[in-house]
Amino acid sequence: MTAIRTILGIESSCDDTAAAVVQNDRTILSSVVAGQADLHAAFGGVVPEIAARAHAEKLDIAVAKALADSGKSLADMDAIAVTAGPGLIGGVISGVMMARGLAAGSGKPLIGVNHLAGHALTPRLTDDLTFPYLMLLVSGGHCQFLTVHGPDSFTRLGGTIDDAPGEAFDKVARLLGLPQPGGPALEQEARKGNANHFALPRPLLKRPGCDMSFSGLKTAVLRERDKLVDAQGGITQQNRSDLCAGFQTAVSDVLAQKSRCALAEYLKLNPENPALAVAGGVAANIQIRDALQSVSMQARVAFTAPPLALCTDNAAMIAWAGLELDAINHHGLIPLIARPRWPLDATSPAMLGSGKKGAKA
């Protein structure tokens, strides 16, 4: 029988300060997430400096609460896992320094986790998926199809060549005067709209392959809004709802069609238990989930989407990824440094450009 291993996870890559305690029997003993929405609301998006300062103020509180809620002490941990990138560098540094201090004081091993791997491995925590499976990682900063071969082995099949869907959701929400975070606000507004009222594009839909684009779709919404302002002096509540519904449906259509393309590539591996999983903040969108589930049913592969609380940034996924890496003795194989960029598939050409900080994706 496998011995129970327990890991403390720490996440601070964007604007959620999180800590969690998870065991390798897939038990989440605690999960604490402290959001910063109120701090950034007036700016229409996340301000990196404000986020970093808030992480520095909240990390010790989040860790203490996670340990208390789990009924465990730091001495009971077998290791500490922390997001070491990619993300807003100030926040990543805050988490890494916190974890280093805890590890130094307790003598516990320290495991650096790729934030994207945390999302990509979440279906292993929630549904015990077997490798390899196809993952659509769709969030505010990332969108890519990955074949997940193991805890540290990923093949990128395609992704966005510009904006991530979550970024596009936030920008469109701002264009239409909706509050941030834009994704949930736009989804709620779309429920009241007619998705067919405006003829919005589906970029790259007919291009072969799994790559996607959402920047042009965002611009199309801007142009429709400006036409309405010129014609009638502003937009009505119904105009706003219709634009939201049209935009959300366009994103859903693109993700669904490109998922079909990615599945075709993935199934060439003849996986024993084929599955499509989706994770990341945008995976919380019900219309997108339903569309992807329909694609999976048509392809006769299993579909899994984590509970909503595990789609958005959290530390349970970081603790679980740490447990997966711990199980293959991955300790110390990668230097634990804070990284603003850290592609999961380092062998594929950069999709979004590269520079001194490395490839974006």
Image (spheres, rainbow, N blue to C red):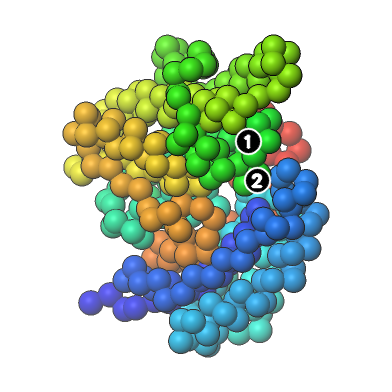
Name the spot of residue 348 as percent of width and height, x first.
52, 31
Name the spot of residue 37 as percent of width and height, x first.
67, 55
Q: Is residue 50 above or below residue 142?
A: below
- Of label 2 and label 1, which has the lower sequence position? 1
Q: Does the residue at mark 2 contact the one at mark 1 (Cβ under 8 Å)?
A: yes
Q: Is residue 233 above or below residue 290?
A: above
Name the spot of residue 196 as percent of width and height, x first.
44, 18
Q: Is residue 119 left or right of residue 305?
A: right
Q: Is residue 334 above or below residue 329?
A: above
Residue found 80% across the figure and 54% down from its top: 49
For the residue pair 341 and 245, the one nearer the viewer reads as 245
For the residue pair 69 and 171, the one nearer the viewer reads as 171
For marks 2 and 1, give the CA distance.
7 Å
Q: Is residue 260 above or below residue 108?
A: above
SS class, disc 2 = loop
Residue placed under numbered mark 1 in the picture = 173
Name the spot of residue 278 as percent of width and height, x first.
39, 43
Residue type, numbered disc 2: Gln
Residue type, numbered disc 1: Ala
- Which image quadrant: the C terminus? top right
How many C-alpha atoms fall within 10 Å of the one at disc 2: few (<14), some, or many (≥20)? Answer: many
- Which image quadrant: the N terminus? bottom left
Residue found 31% across the figure and 78% down from its top: 3
Q: Is residue 90 left or right of residue 328?
A: right
Q: Is residue 25 left or right of residue 36?
A: left
SS class, disc 1 = helix
Q: Is residue 324 left or right of residue 274?
A: right
Residue found 63% across the figure and 61% down from its top: 35
Residue found 52% across the figure and 64% down from its top: 315
How many C-alpha atoms fall within 10 Å of the one at disc 1: few (<14), some, or many (≥20)? Answer: many
Residue placed under numbered mark 2 in the picture = 180
- What is the number of callouts on the image? 2
